[in-house]
Amino acid sequence: MQSLSTEDYLKAIYHASQSDRGTVATTSIANKIGAKPSSVTDMFKKLSEQKLVKYEKYQGVSLTNEGVKTALRIVRKHRLWESFLVSHLNFNWDEVHQVAEQLEHIQSEKLTNELERFLDYPTHDPHGDPIPNRALFMKSYNKILLTELPLNKEGVCIGVKDNSPDFLRYLDRRQIGIGTPILVLHRENFDQSLHIQAGNSTLMITQKTAENIYIKP
Amino acid sequence: MQSLSTEDYLKAIYHASQSDRGTVATTSIANKIGAKPSSVTDMFKKLSEQKLVKYEKYQGVSLTNEGVKTALRIVRKHRLWESFLVSHLNFNWDEVHQVAEQLEHIQSEKLTNELERFLDYPTHDPHGDPIPNRALFMKSYNKILLTELPLNKEGVCIGVKDNSPDFLRYLDRRQIGIGTPILVLHRENFDQSLHIQAGNSTLMITQKTAENIYIKP
DNA sequence: TAAATTTTTTAGTCTAATCTAAATTTGATA
DNA sequence: TATCAAATTTAGATTAGACTAAAAAATTTA
Ligand SMILES: [Mn+2]
Ligand SMILES: [Mn+2]
Ligand SMILES: [Mn+2]
Ligand SMILES: [Mn+2]
């Protein structure tokens, strides 16, 4: 049984190794967790003793199989709770993360599995991220960034890379959400900004926005 | 904002002062919490500094108004979650306490209030205990112990005093639950055991059982 | 490749929450 | 009311998780 803190570290390492592929650096976790690098080093040692990560001084960490499983159990709970908050408790997708950050630590297999059943076995959370099933398996669609969608080829928004409330509320105001059909009408060469059709409306978005939106082509 | 531990102490003090009326002794909390008396003394001092309890050396503690409010906010969450687990997640009433013990610490007013709305503003939890509303007000029925129910006077089970899984499962086997109509057919003078009619079946229960069942006369 | 910079670790400190053992106070008993 | 037992507090130690400051290693730059 892990402490709340070690669970957050494992999850952070898991997410970091998804994007970085391979070993994860001390500072990258320090930034994610909001702790000092020296604290992260301490935790790396602790996790290493528990055989949840492989750690070599100055070389960063990587999750062991057991570490991945533990991380995925947290991710599963996090995303199931986010789904519940949106589907039944009137939360908006920009409000759920903070609360799920706490709920993900509740220890009860029965609770997790019954929640999953109650939600009718959802496969993706409100941000379009895949939810590991009971066996910790998840299938993600193959997806591209909106920056990669060819001109005049219809796509559908299926997720976001940046989960910050600021970005999510910005998308709300632009009426872009999961499921919104999107068409790139024009790509401005000068600054890579895009004119797109999102649902019924035509609008302009910056490159930075486009590279945080996932598209099913 | 309180730590998980201080919240559990406040709740324990609240419950103890409900039954004991007045100040609460160090050992009584030590037993409830499962800690040593010396640890409890330390916590009493901390809570006293935060003005959540009134504490005088060797004289025990009593909650301040602010302490009562804080305790009731925890109790509210505990009982709402218990209700949710039973009504939507297929938990039995003997399984919910342990999980609610964790869920009660989740910090989100919106979550609590939306959960309450989702459950349609329940007034009592699965054990028959009253749920404080948003204003922390709760009205409890007036109730008596089954030991006090007069012979041949119809009553209804509306709660239990002992919430332990052992007792609750025992009641399940006897088909006694919240709402079960109960009639005392005979009281044995020798050992105060009772012959009762519970729902459709007639059965014998000990005094100890009877004094843990609340009845609406 | 040597120097400078950045990253990471070590050493030492702090706080919250716990404990044990010893001292103190209270309250009951003789 | 003096004595004793029980309850409570104090003193001192421990553990997890964090921090700062300084040292060491790795990496980048000149
Ligand atoms: Mn978390
Ligand atoms: Mn999410
Ligand atoms: Mn609790
Ligand atoms: Mn209850």
Image (tube, coloured by chain):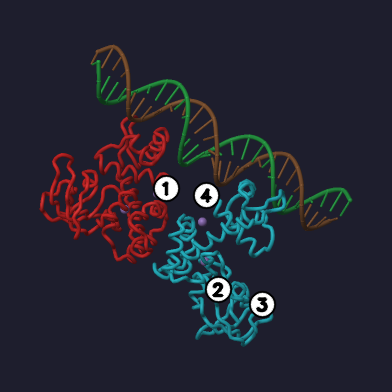
Chain colours: A cyan, B red, C green, D brown
Pointer 2 local density, CA inside 10 Å: few below 14, some 14–19, many at least 20: many
Front position among marks 2 and 1 = 2
Residue under disc 2 on the same chain as residue under disc 1: no
Q: What is the spatial separation of the Cα atoms under label 3 and label 4, in whole angstroms?
A: 46 Å
Look at the numbered disc 4 and give the secondary structure of its residue.
loop
Q: In which quarter of the image is the C terminus of chain A?
A: bottom right
Look at the numbered disc 2 and give the secondary structure of its residue.
strand
Residue A190 or B50: which is nearer the viewer? B50
Give the residue number, with chain letter if any, for mark 4.
Answer: A3
Position of A173 with respect to A40 (left or right) is left
Q: Mark 4 lies on which chain?
A: A
Give the residue number, with chain letter if any, for mark 2.
Answer: A159
Q: What is the spatial separation of the Cα atoms under label 3 and label 2, in whole angstroms?
A: 24 Å
Residue under disc 4 on the same chain as residue under disc 2: yes
Residue farthest bottom in this picture: A152
Mark seen at residue B102: none
Give the percent coordinates (x, y) of residue A137. 56, 67
